[in-house]
Image: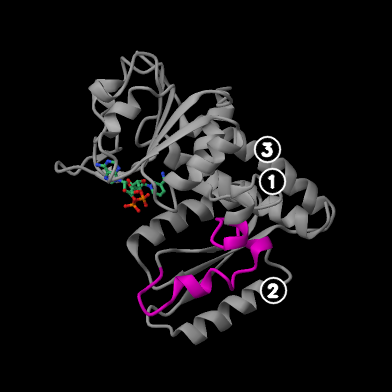
């Protein structure tokens, strides 16, 4: 059986690092703070928010939730966001996306202050990630993939990596982050003729497609390291990933479970980014 890549362990170790840094900041009289901007009350946003609040508390980071009316206009949203940008007590800003239809994300991405943009919404941070500029802030979920690799001392340098899924929030940033580590990266998407052909060549396979158990046993070669970003609910109402875990676990050398894999690490990365942003804003 392949070794489980345990997201909870990775999250706990990140939490320790971040808590220590947050405490050091507090000793200097600086209180790291995240402001969450939530429009309306989508159940998925509320679930993520609960996890984020718990994680920030565990890391000794202050949090404020700015709840905005689901019907808010573009003009009012921009005004609210600019106020958070300018709030000196806030070091990190997380905006739940997708935003409601009346709000223009293409315009709003240019409004969030890049130095406070802890989930890489701003094109400035996207560009910094794409050129490997470490002063930027990378997106939390793709960074959670990299943190899992780091924790288990899996060095992607020179490895054949395959990413299945090419969304702007998961697949593409994972591609860039792996490339920054000098991996040889192939990315597959819905128009790829045969994703399984590429997947079989992977030493490290990262999957984020949103299709329950898309990746079957015959997609994976013996010894592949498999990281599953997917979070789905199957027909039986059971939570599952984009990888057919039960039939792959014996073939993979290492594999993330769902739940308990990438999803467990995301809020710890968020906390780490708040502290990083806080330090940078204070010239530390
Ligand atoms: P998306 O729908 O925006 O993008 C899916 C991508 O997969 C697209 O690039 C599409 O071309 C590709 N794709 C779809 N079907 C495919 C197929 N049959 N073969 C090859 N490529 C295919 O989804 P997303 O927002 O990127 O999310 C992907 C998954 O990651 C979902 O299960 C989502 O729930 C999960 N997710 C998890 C976290 C986390 O914290 N763990 C965060 C965000 C998303």
Q: CA distance from mark 2 to mark 1?
A: 24 Å
Q: Nearer the viewer, mark 2 or mark 1?
A: 1
Q: Main secondary structure of the magenta part?
A: loop
Residue 207, magenta (yes or no): no
Above or below, comparing residue 232 to residue 8 in the picture: below
Measuring from the top left, give residue 166's x and y in whole percent. Answer: 39, 47
Quadrant that contains the N terminus: top left
Bounds of the magenta segment = 99-125
- Residue 228, visible in the rendered structure: no
Residue denoted by label 3: 17
Q: Is residue 76 above or below residue 108?
A: below
- 94 or 28, which lies in front? 94
Q: Which residue lies at the image location 43% right of the left edge and 55% below the top edge?
A: 48
Secondary structure under tag 2 reads: loop
The residue at which mark 1 appears reads as: 134
Mark 3 and mark 2: Cα distance apart in space: 26 Å
Residue of label 2 = 87
Q: Is residue 102 left or right of residue 191?
A: right
Decide: is 77 above or below 177. Answer: below
- In-front residue for pair 156/48: 156
Image coordinates for residue 256, horizontal then vertical, percent: 40, 29
Residue 88 appearing in the image:
yes
Q: Residues within 10 Å of mark 1 (few under 14, many from 20)?
A: few
Task: Decide which of tag 1 and tag 3 comes sooner along the chain.
Answer: 3
Label 1: element kind? loop
């Amino acid at each position: 059986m392949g070794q489980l890549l345990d997201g909870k362990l990775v999250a706990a170790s990140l939490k320790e690092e971040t808590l220590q840094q947050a405490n050091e900041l507090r000793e200097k009289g600086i209180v790291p703070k995240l402001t969450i901007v939530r429009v309306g009350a989508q159940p998925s946003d509320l679930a993520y928010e609960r996890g984020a609040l718990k994680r920030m508390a565990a890391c000794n980071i202050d949090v404020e939730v700015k709840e905005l009316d689901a019907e808010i206009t573009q003009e009012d949203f921009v005004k609210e966001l600019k106020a958070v940008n300018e709030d000196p007590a806030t070091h990190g800003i997380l905006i739940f996306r997708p935003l409601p239809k009346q709000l223009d994300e293409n315009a709003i991405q240019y409004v969030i202050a890049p130095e406070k943009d802890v989930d890489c919404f701003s094109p400035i941070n996207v560009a910094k990630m794409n050129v490997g500029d470490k002063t930027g802030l990378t997106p939390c979920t793709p960074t959670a993939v990299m943190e899992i690799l780091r924790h288990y001392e899996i060095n992607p340098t020179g490895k054949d990596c395959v990413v299945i899924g090419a969304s702007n929030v998961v697949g593409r940033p994972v591609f860039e982050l792996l490339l920054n580590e000098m991996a040889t990266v192939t990315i597959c998407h819905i128009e790829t003729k045969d994703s399984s052909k590429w997947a079989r060549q992977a030493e490290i396979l990262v999957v984020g497609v949103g299709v329950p158990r898309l990746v079957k046993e015959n997609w994976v070669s013996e010894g592949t390291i498999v990281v599953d970003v997917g979070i789905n609910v199957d027909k039986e109402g059971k939570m599952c990933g984009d990888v057919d875990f039960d039939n792959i676990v014996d073939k993979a050398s290492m594999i993330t479970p769902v739940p308990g894999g990438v999803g467990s690490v995301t809020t710890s990365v968020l906390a780490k980014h708040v502290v990083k942003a806080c330090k940078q804003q204070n010239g530390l």
